[in-house]
Amino acid sequence: MEIIYQLLEDGIIDKEQLVLKRHKYIGLKKQEAIFIAKLFKNKEIKEHTFSISKLANILNLSEESIQVLIRTLIASNCLKVINKDKQITFDFNYTIVKLLETYWSPSKNSSLEKQIIWIKEILGFELNEENEKAIAHWINEDSWERVVLAVKKTSLVKNNSWPLLLNAYESLNRSATHADKELKEIMNINWLEV
């Protein structure tokens, strides 16, 4: 992970694009992602401390809009603000880590506990015991890849929930079953007679 931080620090990985492309995976709204991207992009803001009014001028937003965005981002743990004498400094390290983690998923050989923790983090809601048993069953059926796809697909929906995850998984499972059936039919054809 240290290499990735160095790539971010050196500007090889574009923080603005990272937040704009992956914001939905960590529950950020588009407006919040654009705000963060503007903060990353604006050279005047980087490594400086600002007042709300100066920040509003630089980003061409109202002070009220800036305050609402900052409050929302703080509440969702996507922003840490160091506030001294009406001057603010931003810390987005937690957000960067969360965004980078959206590219990672545990391997199918990881422990069930790690897999369940990852699912909860990506989806942003708790799973009850029955839900966890269902997921364990899916994983034991050797379909971890489908579970990962279903989780990522569900995480893009604004108000994701267990029924949405269940529907996404069942849809992917039906598609895979249909593809397996077609493959078996193809494999059973005696191609020398055709």
Image (cartoon, rainbow, N blue to C red):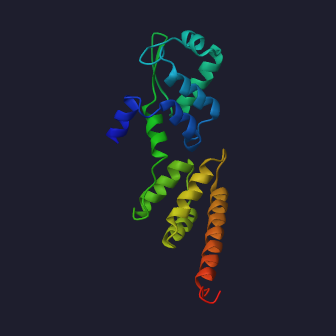
Could you tell me which quadrant the C terminus lies in? bottom right
Identify which residue, 20 or 27, lies in the foreground: 20
Could you tell me which quadrant the N terminus lies in? top left
The correct choice, above or below, for 59 with respect to 114 in the image is above
Q: Residue at x 63, y 33 (%)?
A: 30
Counting every numbered tag in the picture gives 0
User: Which residue lies most toward the bottom here?
Assistant: 193
Q: Point out residue 130 in the picture as x, y percentages from the top left corner.
A: 57, 65
Quadrant in which residue 22 is drawn: top right
Quadrant in which residue 23 is drawn: top right
Q: Residue at x 63, y 78 (%)?
A: 181
The correct choice, above or below, for 23 with respect to 109 in the image is above
Q: Point out residue 65 in the picture as x, y percentages from the top left corner.
A: 64, 20
User: Which residue lies most toward the left here?
Assistant: 2
The correct choice, above or below, for 192 with respect to 148 in the image is below
Identify which residue, 152 or 181, lies in the foreground: 181
Q: Point out residue 167 in the picture as x, y percentages from the top left corner.
A: 67, 61
Quadrant in which residue 84 is drawn: top left
